[in-house]
Amino acid sequence: MSSEQASTRLPVIDVEPVLAGSSGAIEATAEQLREALENVGFLSIVGHGIEWQTIREMYDWTASYHELVDEAKFGHEMTSTLMGYVGLGGAQRGDRPFALNAAFFMGRPGSKRNQFPAEEALPGFRNAAENYYRTLERLCHQLLPLYAVAADMPPAFFETFFDPALATLRMSHYPPIDAEPDQWGIDPHSDAGFMTLLPANEVSGLSIASDDGWFAVDQEQESFVVNAGDTLRAWSNNRFRSTKHRALNKSAGNRYAIPFFFDPRPDTIIEALAGCVDEDRPLAVKPYRYGDYLQSFMRDGYIPAAN
């Protein structure tokens, strides 16, 4: 494996004044967000208003889900058209070693693409997952004005593109397995979409790339690690970073992660924002349809399940 340097703290941004509607909060906080996105592509947010017990309970549900017998989980396996379960070995890029994680994916509550375990197999799981999804989606919508102002656009600019959002909740399990050379819990990658929220984890494992190598992330207590994806990078005319990251469980026990991917509608045309194009930043990206890019991203990273 490539070497990993000392841990690093991410820029920490308190969003409580924004959520409270304090005068001038959007402009002041957007300035901090702009700096973090331009220089790191990752940050931590505190003051997000979500009771941390909600997060703890979702971690517990994730552990309970992955403790189900394989028969229960593979009964709703993810396919090219349906969300669901991807077992250990099901995530692989090209001819690289497969990623050492299993995961359950779900989309918008009520979507016909969702699949869940039978209620009797894990009573209450679906309701808990859907409630958590709505909680995270609400927070992301509240953060959108910050991203618009950080990109020198009007505060309401992004709202129409996320009505509704194409958001995904992933509940991942990284078992305690020794990795082969150049094998990871999840391979080095940048996210496909706009914004990812990852709640602080009791078991470390996340690291990010910089110009000087790889750094383990030292997470703030009761925070969300937030990163930009390829779509925000393209939308910003490459002004904001979409930073590569990876994960590996080096502990003797299980590691769970519950990232929430908040992305625009699939029919959204991603083209450079006017606020991010000027003499110093000439046009550098070509327009594309977000849904097309996402399909390509998923095909590259996950072995298609047989239909």
Image: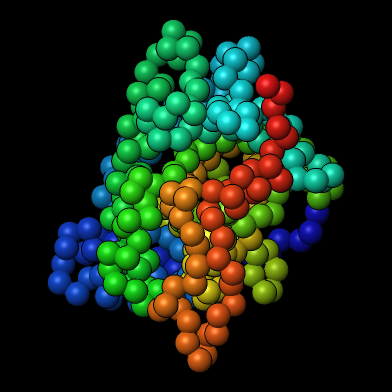
Residue 242 occupies quadrant:
bottom right
Image position of 222 with respect to 279: above or below: above
Q: Position of residue 137 (x, y in %)?
A: 35, 45
Report the number of discs.
Answer: 0
Q: Residue at x 50, y 62 (%)?
A: 270
Q: Nearer the viewer, residue 301 or 187?
A: 301
Q: Position of residue 89 (x, y in %)?
A: 74, 32
Q: Nearer the viewer, residue 122 or 111?
A: 111
**Quadrant in the picture for the C terminus:** top right
Q: Residue at x 54, y 48 (%)?
A: 291
Image position of 61 with respect to 97: above or below: above
Q: Nearer the viewer, residue 225 or 274?
A: 274
Q: Position of residue 288 (x, y in %)?
A: 56, 60
Residue 202 at least partly seen: no
Q: Is residue 194 left or right of residue 250?
A: left
Q: Is residue 251 left or right of residue 111?
A: right
Residue 235 at least partly seen: yes
Image position of 277 with respect to 89: above or below: below
Q: Position of residue 84 (x, y in %)?
A: 55, 27
Residue 189 occupies quadrant:
bottom right
**Quadrant in the picture for the N terminus:** bottom right
Q: How is the image coloured?
A: rainbow
Residue 16 occupies quadrant:
bottom left
Q: Residue furthest bottom?
A: 279
Q: Residue at x 69, y 54 (%)?
A: 188
Q: Residue at x 47, y 50 (%)?
A: 267
Q: Nearer the viewer, residue 196 or 255?
A: 196
